[in-house]
Amino acid sequence: MKLKEIDFWITKLGLEPHPEGGFYKRTYESGEKVSDQELTVHYEGQRKLYTSIYFLLTSENVSHLHRLKSDELWYFHAGSSLTIHVIHENGEYEEMKLGMNLEEGEVLQALVPKNSIFGSSVMEDNAYSLVGCMVSPGFDFQDFELFTQKELLTQYPQHREIILKLAYKEIPE
């Protein structure tokens, strides 16, 4: 693995471990706020109009399956290509490939719709992916749900392989 590069990004960007896996740092947040009165999603209180983070994932870990009440737009920055695994609200599974190889169907940015269950994994061995994620309305841990394998297998048995790969056996404390 490119440990020097990973350490460089973690140190230079001030990244910290994220509960879903990988490392992150909030980089921007809107000064504007919005309430659920203007939206189709119910929130407690108000949310920033948008928030943005750096997110680094290695091939040694995954972003575990989780759900947000907001849309999340992903931007590719550096390293290996990344797969975003999405189980949509209707139960359909989709893989989005985030990276520089446009001729192979990768994209530089991808939208994960609100209320989808999703996680991500680095496509190459011994590699990392550095991406940016913008959430609107802004990210708040109140709106963040992590899932166990058991919870998801009950609801989506047809996606067993990806659930076993990306969902926690038990939610860490």
Image (cartoon, rainbow, N blue to C red):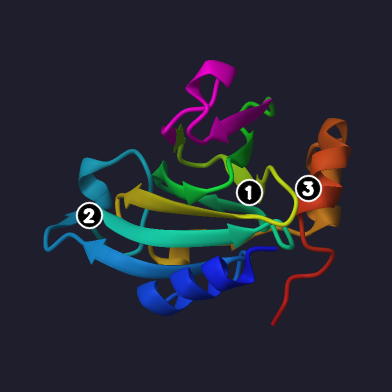
Q: Nearer the viewer, mark 3 or mark 1?
A: 1
> Which residue shows up at 52% across the image and 42% down it?
115
Q: Nearer the viewer, mark 1 or mark 2?
A: 1
Amino acid type of disc 2? Ser
Q: Which residue is mark 1?
A: 119
Amino acid type of disc 1? Gly
**Residue 152: which numbered mark, if any?**
3
Image location of residue 88, percent across then percent down: 60, 31
Q: Nearer the viewer, residue 150 or 134?
A: 134
Q: Earlier in the sequence, mark 1 or mark 2?
A: 2
Q: Which residue is mark 2?
A: 35
Q: Nearer the viewer, residue 85 or 54?
A: 54
Image location of residue 128, percent across then percent down: 60, 56
In the rendered structure, which segment of residues is drawn in magenta? 93-110
> Which residue shows up at 86% across the image and 55% down it?
150
> Which residue shows up at 70% across the image and 63% down it?
1
Res. 18 in view? no
Amino acid type of disc 3? Leu
The C terminus: image quadrant: bottom right
Image location of residue 6, percent across then percent down: 55, 68
Q: Earlier in the sequence, mark 2 or mark 3?
A: 2
Res. 171 in view? yes
- Give neighbour class at mark 2: few <14, some 14-19, many 20+ (Cα, 10 Å): some
Query: Is the C-beta separation of discs 3 and 1 under 8 Å?
Result: no
Query: Is the C-beta separation of discs 2 and 3 under 8 Å?
Result: no
Q: Earlier in the sequence, mark 3 or mark 1?
A: 1
In this rendering, the answer to whether 144 lies above or below 173 is: above
